[in-house]
Image: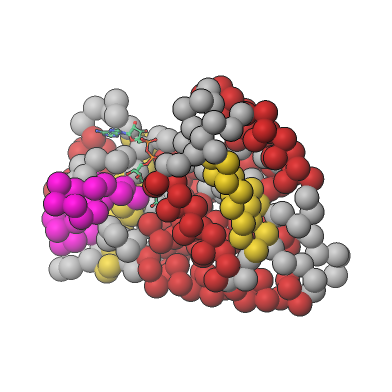
Amino acid sequence: MSAQIIDGKAVSARVRAEVAERVRGLVARGVTPGLTVLLAGEDPASATYVRNKEKAALECGIRGATLRFPADVSAATLAAELDRLNADPEVDGILVQLPLPPGISAEDSRALQRRIAPEKDVDGFLPFNQGLLMIGEPGFVPCTPAGCMRLLAEAGVSPRGKHAVVVGRSNIVGKPMAMLLLAADATVTIAHSRTPDLAAVVRTADIVVAAVGRPGLVRGDWLKPGAVVLDVGINRLPDGKLGGDVAFAEAVSVASAITPVPGGVGPMTIACLLENVCRAAERRLPPA
Ligand code: NAD
C-alpha cells in the first residue's frame, strides 16, 4: 500500500486564493491590508525569504513593503521604526526578519522582536500570542504549525482522540504544533533530542509531526502502519536537493498519508502568513 501524498503546493494555492478573495472584499470596504518587513544587513538567504513574502503578499492584493537597513544600523533606529509602524493604521502586520546583523546583540534582537504590537504580530511569535494559544484563546498562531493543521484538515484527518507525537520542541514549530493538536482534541506527546528510544515513542503515534532539522531521522519502521506523517524538516542534502526529517521512500509504504519535501508543509507557511495579515486587517473594518 502506498500513502496518500498530501499536496502542500495545491493546498497553499487554495489558501492564497481564499486570501485574495478576502482581500478583494476588504478593499471594496476601503481597507487594503498591509504587511511590512524590516530587513537589516545583507544576508542573501534573508533577502530571498523577504522577497518571496513580499511577492506573495502583492499577488493576493496585500500591500507588501520591505524596509531595508544597512548592516550597521543601530537597535535604537530599528526600535524607532517599529514604534512608527505600530502606530501606522495602514500597517496590519509587521515582521522583523532574522537574523539581525551581528552588531545587534541577542538581547537587543529579542527586545526588537517583542516591540511589535501584539495585534500586528502576524508571525505569532510574541509571548502574548503564544500565551493565547496555550490557554486556547484566539490570537495569531505561528504560520508553519497553522499550515500543518490545514494540511490535516484537507487530507480529511481529524486529530480528535488520536495520539499525536511531535518530534521537536522549538518555540516556532514544535511547541505551538503540540498546542494546536491538543486544542483539536489529540493526545499529544512532545519528543525531542533528549527523548530516549525515539523510535518506540514514534511507533505509538497515529499522527507524527517531524520538526527537527535532521535529514531522514524518522525511519519507515518507526511508524505505526497507517500513521499520518507531516514532515516539517527542510534539509539541504549532500546532492544539493532538499529533503525532510522523514525517510520518505521508506515511510510512504507504511503511512496512510504523508507530506513530501519539498512541496508539503513548506509552501503552507507563507500562505498562512498571508491569512494572518488578512485577519489583522479585518479588525480595521467598522462593525457591520
Ligand atoms: P530548531 O533547531 O529550533 O528545533 C529542533 C528541535 O529538534 C529541537 O527542539 C530539538 O530538541 C529537536 N531535536 C534535535 N535533534 C533531535 C534528535 N536527534 N531527535 C529528536 N529531536 C531532536 O528547529 P525548528 O526551527 O523547529 O525547525 C525544525 C525543522 O523544520 C528545520 O529543518 C527547519 O528548516 C524546518 N522548518 C520548516 C519550516 C517550513 O516548512 N516553512 C518552517 C520552520 C522550520
Q: As rendered, which of 264 and 102 lies closer to the eye?
A: 102
Please report the residue visible at 74 percent of the width from the left and 38 percent of the height from the top. 83
**What is the quadrant of residue 261 in the picture?**
bottom left
Residues rendered magenta in the picture: 232-255
**What is the quadrant of residue 81 in the picture?**
top right
Quadrant for the C terminus in the image: bottom right
Please report the residue visible at 23 percent of the width from the left and 59 percent of the height from the top. 255
Q: As rendered, which of 223 and 73 lies closer to the eye?
A: 73
Where is residue 34 drawn, in percent x and y?
68, 59
Quadrant for the N terminus in the image: bottom left
Q: How is the image coloured?
A: secondary structure
Please report the residue visible at 61 percent of the width from the left and 48 percent of the height from the top. 67
In this rendering, does residue 220 appear at all? no
Where is residue 192 drawn, in percent x and y?
32, 32
Q: Does residue 24 appear left or right of residue 123 in this picture? A: right
Q: Is residue 88 above or below residue 212?
A: below
Q: Main secondary structure of the magenta part?
A: loop
Q: Is residue 182 above or below residue 62?
A: above
Residue 273 lies in the magenta-colored region = no
